[in-house]
């Protein structure tokens, strides 16, 4: 099981951008006041055009994950990502924690997934083939629903750092004694795992002062220097490049976060690093998925 590398390439890199827009605040954070919404609006309105121009400068194609709500609110911007040759994939409908989680009835999950795909298709003219859930919530029924709807890959799990894998369905996990675990079977859905330290949001985003520490999204708001994050991302890339032939270096970024000042310098310097290696294949996730061999 591996990515089939193009001629002369020894590993791959994918730049992914979650265009959460207003709905991460309205949905997941449950905050609807103007200041927060303006922060969300920054992503599609200011961040995405800057990112698109920078990607063009480097001749790199990426994947933009759009919630249905963002595609509906900013159809021209999400459409522009597709027109500039990037992949636009789906990122839930309303960025709600349990939208496709265990507590939502099956039919409601199906409705959310169809609604998000319809919204993305209206903006881009194409049905999304990749999915990323909001946060880490995703119930066992979702891979089959995604396959039913023609999705090719998912990117919501963390079971590896550099190697994609076929997503398992039908695991049985007992939450109490004797804690029996039975693994299910592999599905046809390819998983592109991600990791929190490869995500810009927890490194940079200021979210704690108004949040109750008892709430799930309370965090330390580190507001890191881009140099610190660059150290983390570069070291991770370096390890993969030296030790994991055929691996995938996978960055998860958010235009409302990476699209600002010093953080754009980080993105530019990462693009310089990745494009300086002629044996690194930089591609949208859908291209990597189509190169997968079992
Ligand atoms: Zn998101």
Image: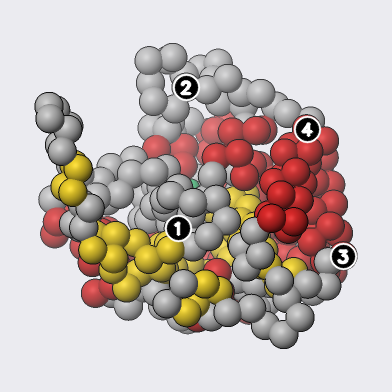
Give the Cα separation between the discs numbered 3 and 2. Answer: 38 Å
Numbered label attached to residue 184: none
**Callout 1 secondary element:** loop
Task: Point out the residue furthest to the front here.
Answer: 243
Mark earlier in primary sequence (4, 3) = 4
Give the x, y percent position of residue 139.
Answer: 24, 50
Give the x, y percent position of residue 253.
Answer: 62, 49
Residue 53 appears in view: no
Give the x, y percent position of residue 245.
Answer: 66, 65
What residue do we see at 18% from left, 49% from top?
Answer: 182
Q: Which residue corresponds to mark 2? A: 218
Mark earlier in primary sequence (3, 2) = 2
Q: Quadrant of residue 144?
A: bottom left
Residue density around tag 3, few if under 14, some if 14–19, many if 20 or more, within 10 Å: few
Q: Are marks 3 and 2 in contact (CB under 8 Å)?
A: no
Q: Are marks 2 and 1 in contact (CB under 8 Å)?
A: no
Disc 3 beta carbon < 8 A from ligand 1?
no
What residue do we see at 62% from left, 45% from top?
Answer: 198
Left or right relative to 108: residue 35:
right
**Callout 2 secondary element:** loop
Q: Which residue corresponds to mark 3? A: 276
Give the Cα separation between the discs numbered 1 and 3. Answer: 26 Å
Mark earlier in primary sequence (2, 1) = 1
Q: Nearer the viewer, mark 2 or mark 4?
A: 4
What residue do we see at 58% from left, 20% from top?
Answer: 220
Mark earlier in primary sequence (1, 4) = 1
Q: Which residue corresponds to mark 4? A: 228
Mark earlier in primary sequence (2, 4) = 2
Residue 291, compared with residue 195, is above or below; it is below
Q: Which residue corresponds to mark 1? A: 155
What residue do we see at 46% from left, 42% from top?
Answer: 24
């Amino acid at each position: 099981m591996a990515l089939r590398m193009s001629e002369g390439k020894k590993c791959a890199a994918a730049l992914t951008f979650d265009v959460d827009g207003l709905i991460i605040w309205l949905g997941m954070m449950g905050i609807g006041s103007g200041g927060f919404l303006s922060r969300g609006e920054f992503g599609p309105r200011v961040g995405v055009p800057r990112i698109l121009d920078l990607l063009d400068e480097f001749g790199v194609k990426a994947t933009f994950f759009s919630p249905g709500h963002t595609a509906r609110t900013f159809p021209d911007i999400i459409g522009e990502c597709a027109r500039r040759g990037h992949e636009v994939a789906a990122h839930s409908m309303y960025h709600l924690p349990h939208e496709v989680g265990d507590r939502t009835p099956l039919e409601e999950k199906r409705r959310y997934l169809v609604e998000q795909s319809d919204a993305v298709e209206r903006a881009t003219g194409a049905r999304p083939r990749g999915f990323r859930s909001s946060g880490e919530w995703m119930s066992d029924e979702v891979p089959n629903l995604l396959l039913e709807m023609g999705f090719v890959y998912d990117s919501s799990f963390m079971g590896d750092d550099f190697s994609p894998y076929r997503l398992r369905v039908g695991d049985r996990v007992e939450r109490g004694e004797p804690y029996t675990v039975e693994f299910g079977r592999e599905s046809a859905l390819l998983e592109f795992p991600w990791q929190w330290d490869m995500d810009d949001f927890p490194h940079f985003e200021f979210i704690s002062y108004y949040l109750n520490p008892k709430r799930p999204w309370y965090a330390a708001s580190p507001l890191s220097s881009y140099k610190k994050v660059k150290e983390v991302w570069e070291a991770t890339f370096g390890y993969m490049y030296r030790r994991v032939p055929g691996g995938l270096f996978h960055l998860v970024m958010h235009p409302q976060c990476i699209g600002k000042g010093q953080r754009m310098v980080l993105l530019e310097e990462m693009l310089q690093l990745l494009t300086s290696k002629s044996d690194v294949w930089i591609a949208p996730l859908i291209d990597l998925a189509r190169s997968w061999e079992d």
